[in-house]
Image (spheres, rainbow, N blue to C red):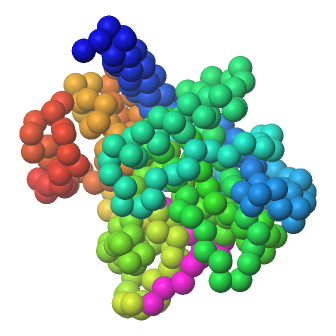
Amino acid sequence: MTLFKIIRILILLAVFVVVAFYTKNQKLKSRSWTEPLSVVIYRINGDNNSPVVNEYINELDEGVFEPVDRFMQQQSEKYTLITKQPTQIRMGAVLTVQPPEAPLPGSGYAAIIWWGLKFRYWTYKNTPDSDSDMRRIRIFVLYHEAVQGRSLQHSLGLDKGLAAVIHAFASIEQDQQNNIVIAHELLHTVGATDKYAADNSALFPTGYADPEQSPLYPQTKAEIMVGRIPLSETGMRMADSLSECVDWRTNSERNQLAAGREITRPIRCFPMQLNDEASAILNSLFLNSFRRGGVLYTHCTSTRHRLFFPSGRGDLKKPGFDWQKV
Ligand SMILES: [Zn+2]
């Protein structure tokens, strides 16, 4: 191996270590919900500088995105977060650069990781400012001309790095559905996972707004990590706006309240030994676990259950644990 190669590998390793440390810190801060997360929407013309898209982009104002803040606030009410307002959305500049081409669905793990790094470098280069990125989510919306029957590339929210790329239609009629995609990808950046199957149908029960409804169909709302409302066993439709969406976890708690079961206050559930991965998994389950004074707090919805860790606390490698009745 030449000296040049060794130096190159060492530099790459150093970059990985720095990124890993930064990401860990960013995750802990952004998911503590102790103060609002700043969400910045950067507008990009995704259709070769199309004048129709440019006109739409330039006429957009912050008020269009308000339903996203409202949704996050309403859905978090049941969680007794430290902050009363989980997100604060604002509009950033119009960008004239395009983010790196996203990997195609089904691309290998290495391609996705490589794209993630390139994309994060791109965000760093193109949206620098003095704000701390520990609690700032950058959302890059690529707008395209709304043509009937046209389908867009998948939007992507990074689980690491607080950034997302969204493909949206530049049309006033689409504003509210665009907000659904923004809320969905925003939740990905703070650890939420998709709740739909490969054929886009909602997973049961987590992908249903109200899995306890009887009869089960038609559902009236969409789980935000699905975006579609199950109408029958095989039928579904896109939600029209965020007012037709809920966060299932919130709803599930509401159902328990309705059933007269006691919901505990945030309690001191787990000692600090939980590693970052375990905290991330808990976050994706509860949305709002937080650490304070060296202790991880979470909202256990029922005292009848406790988390079962297959490989012992602090060594949670896979989200393979399950609720265990005690
Ligand atoms: Zn998703």
Q: Position of residue 157 (x, y in %)?
A: 51, 50
Position of the N terminus by quadrant: top left
Is residue 185 shown above or below 161?
below
Residue found at x 65% / y 83%: 149
| Farthest-out residue, front | 2
In the image, what residue occupies the spot 70% across and 32% down? 127
On screen, residue 247 versus residue 125, left or right, reads left
Q: Residue at x 72, y 42 (%)?
A: 97
The spot of residue 273 in percent (x, y) is 22, 25
Q: Residue at x 9, y 39 (%)?
A: 311
Q: Relative to the observer, which residue lies in front, 224 or 259?
A: 224
5 left or right, relative to 99:
left
Q: Is residue 254 visible?
A: no
**Where residue 46 sits: x, y (%)?**
72, 57
- How many numbered badges does the structure rendering display? 0
On the image, the x and y values in percent for residue 107 come to 37, 55
The relative height of residue 61 versus residue 38 in the rendered view (above or below) is: below
90 horizontally vs 307: left or right: right
Whether residue 124 is visible: yes
Query: Was residue 242 drawn as part of the magenta stretch in this picture?
Result: yes
Front-most of residues 104 and 282:
104
The region drawn magenta spans 235-247
Q: Nearer the viewer, residue 265 or 279?
A: 279
Q: Residue furthest top?
A: 3
Reply yes or no: does residue 307 show up in magenta: no
